Image: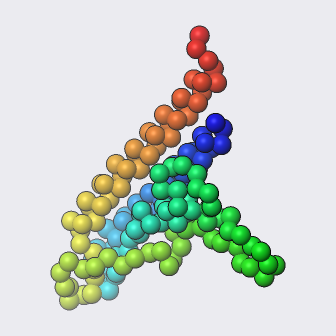
């Protein structure tokens, strides 16, 4: 029971960190909307979450985590997670947004797309927080017992 709860909270914590990083990227895109040559960046949230959780896309622990790769020889390199220690996404996971229309200054930020993505991500961030809070409350109620 405790392992399942811990795995669910770990999954939701990872999702929250990725949502936060995506929000930072989208805010950066919006802030640089008038910067000549700026290329908008984003992450594929679904794939980043799958990679960060070792394939546990449904919140259940997977049999194999990306941080727990088998190292059968001393020279094997340990696997790395999609989410770095600071909560950021590895640079190779970042994607460039495709410009919806050509600009003379080479900027690929589409403000309508960025605002919509920002709002959508903010709502999903809030939903993840509420889910975590609900799990913690349920756990505390179970620990306290019914009075």
Residue 13: in sight, yes or no?
Answer: no
Q: Quadrant of the C terminus?
A: top right
Q: Going by the image, does 33 lie left or right of 69?
A: left
Residue 65, percent from left and from top: 62, 61
Foreground residue among 15 and 74: 74
Depth order, front residue of 7/88: 7
Who's the residue at 55% across and 59% down the image? 53
* Residue for point 42% across, 62% down: 46
User: For the point 32% across and 59% down, which residue is it?
Assistant: 118
Name of the residue lying farthest toward the top: 147
Relative to 103, is 128 above or below?
above
Please determine whether, in this image, residue 19 is positioned above or below residue 138. below
Give percent across and percent down for residue 100: 20, 77
Seen as rendered, the residue at the extreme left is 101
Q: Is residue 25 left or right of residue 4?
A: left
Q: Please tell me in which quadrant of the rendered image residue 137 appears.
A: top right
Q: How many marks?
A: 0
Residue toward you, 114 or 7: 7
Q: Measuring 20% from the left and 85% from the top, which residue is drawn there?
A: 103
Residue 41, position in %: x, y? 38, 74
């Amino acid at each position: 029971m405790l392992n399942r709860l811990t795995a669910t909270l770990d999954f939701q914590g990872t999702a929250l960190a990725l949502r936060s990083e995506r929000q930072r990227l989208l805010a950066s895109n919006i802030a640089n909307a008038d910067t000549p040559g700026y290329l908008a960046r984003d992450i594929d949230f679904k794939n980043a979450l799958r990679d960060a959780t070792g394939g546990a896309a449904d919140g259940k622990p997977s049999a194999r985590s990306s941080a727990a790769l088998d190292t059968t020889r001393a020279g094997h390199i340990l696997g790395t997670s999609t989410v770095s220690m600071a909560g950021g996404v590895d640079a190779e996971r970042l994607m460039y947004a495709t410009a919806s229309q050509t600009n003379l200054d080479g900027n690929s930020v589409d403000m309508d797309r960025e605002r919509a993505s920002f709002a959508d991500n903010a709502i999903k961030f809030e939903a993840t927080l509420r889910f975590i809070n609900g799990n913690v409350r349920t756990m505390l109620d179970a620990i306290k017992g019914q009075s």
